[in-house]
Image (spheres, rainbow, N blue to C red):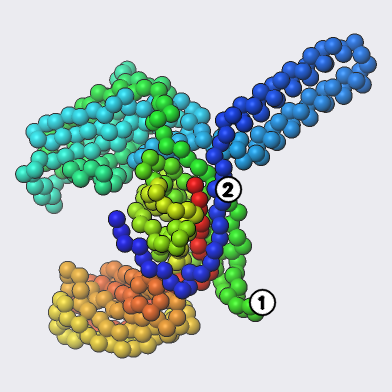
Amino acid sequence: MPEPIQSSELEKAVRDVSAVPEPDAEFVNALRARFIAEGHASAIKHQENQMKSRSLTKRLTWAVVVLILVALVLLSTSPTVVNALKRLLGYVPNVGIIDQSAQVMVLSEPVTMTRDGFTLTVEQAVLNNGMLTIVYSYVMPADFVFVPDPNGIFGESSYLILADGTRVDIVAGKQVNTADCPSCSVRYAMDLAPVPSGLESATFVVPTLVMMQVGAAPEDWRIPLKLKPAGPDDFAPVIELEVTPPPTATQSVSETPTESVNTYGITNILDKVIVLPDGYILYGITAWTDPSVLPYGAGAILATITDANGAQVPYDYADPGIYTLTSDQKIYWAYKVAKDVATPLTLNFVMTASLPADGGAFTFDPGADPQLGQKWDINQDAVVNGQVVHVLSAEQGGIEPGYFQFMMQSEGNIVGAAITDLAHPPQGSGGGGGGLPETTFAAGFQYQMPLPPGPFTYTFINVQIIVPGDWKLTWSP
């Protein structure tokens, strides 16, 4: 479990995210029965008065319409009913959020096969809306050592064979955490489509184990799969939180109305909670509107989670892959906490943003024959985006000659930077961040070899800053 990052004085703010009440099945059923009964009574009344005047008939017709509208309004606005409807979503570990309003089929039981000391297990299979997600893992023999061959090739991707011989290929795949399976060498999840709804059996074919080259391990695995209709125990509840993000253009940092700071249109919200037997997974979205922030350039760094008593709560990083990437102005985060915590919980974030640099440069001469690991004192200052950045030292690091890494520190809120040498075509450049003010951060540059003669001039091309503001979120189950 990772150690929580220490919080910064710059992350000051409190914004409560209220949990929607759990659905009350008795209330929903009673409400629905009342609507049916009242609608039935209205119909009988209408039938009894068929011979009455046309105007009375019209009034009764409108009464029924109004009753239906009232019912729809109540069903769509009552928090209890809203949450009940949202429970049509369910969460499956390693798979994600499932729409239970459509038919869902799941693996009847895990399937394990062993060949030449390798054990492959299909752990999960979930079919929903024409997409079949399969999660499999494998364990290598204890004495097996895999050394990748630079000239080797990776084999064909896995696929599915339906009963009629139709082949269904993978449309996406990703590695999955193996923390709960220490013996697993790899766990992999893949989506296959299109797959017919209600599929009960198929053959899963693994030509080559994922991450293995051809010839390195047993090949052409064929695993028969049996699926069954999903039941309530196959899902964890999903709570969708209804939140209203605060204004994002600027945030006041003093009592003087005219003194404000740009927050780049950033919002940070907690929008889903997964209820697991052993804890909760908190899912959130950080989004922004200011185009000056580089694509995927904002970051919500979780400093700490504290409980109702102010004590720090341990947390694990979780996979935010339930979200589909729809914009380069959004990032997603997910954290898991235990259930035995004193709520409400407060999530303390530090917000960062990557911005283009408006200039600023420094010089460095490594000499005629710099050596790997050699270090130099620089002690130069550069003005970048109106702030002084101290360039402290340099080192020829990495695993190849020609890569120089520079340690820096800012007097303001710059906590990371990227640099380039405009006089030489870059082979690679990089930046880093200390994450908090008053800490050092690194920026690097890679030259093509042979190394050109110095001295070199480095220009800042972008910086990472701490964004002041209220970035705390609170939650109670």
Q: Position of residue 312 (x, y in %)?
A: 39, 61
How many marks the image carries: the answer is 2
Instruction: Give me the C-alpha separation between circle 2 and circle 1.
Output: 30 Å
Residue name at image x 16 percent, y 34 percent? 119
Which residue shows up at 57% across the image and 34% down it?
A: 24
Q: Label 2: how many residues lie within 10 Å, few (<14), some (14-19) or many (20+)?
A: some
The reply to whether residue 317 is in sight is yes
Task: Give 240 or 463, whichever is nearer the viewer.
Answer: 240
In this rendering, is residue 303 above or below 83?
Answer: below
| Residue 275, above or below 246 | above
- Residue bearing mark 2: 242
Establish if 393 lies above or below 312. below
N-term-proximal mark, 2 vs 1: 2
The residue positioned farthest toward the left in the image shown: 143
**Secondary structure of residue under mark 2:** loop
Q: Is residue 316 above or below residue 404?
A: above
* Quarter of the image where one finds residue 98: top left
Mark 1 is surrounded, within 10 Å at the Cα level, by few (under 14), some (14 to 19) or many (20 or more) other residues, namely few
Residue drawn at 31 percent across, 39 percent down: 189
Q: Residue at x 28, y 74 (%)?
A: 445
Which one is nearer the viewer's eye here, 277 or 331?
277
Query: Mark 1 belongs to which amino acid?
Result: Pro
Under tag 1, what secondary structure? loop
Image location (x, y in percent) of residue 388: 42, 85
* 46 relative position to 320: left or right: right
**Residue 127 coordinates in the image, percent (x, y):** 39, 29
Where on the picture, by quarter, is residue 313?
Answer: bottom left
Q: Inspect this view and state whether residue 161 appears.
A: no
**What residue is disc 1 on?**
257
Q: Which quarter of the image is occupied by the N terminus?
A: bottom left
Q: Which mark is residue 97?
A: none
Three-letter code, disc 2: Glu
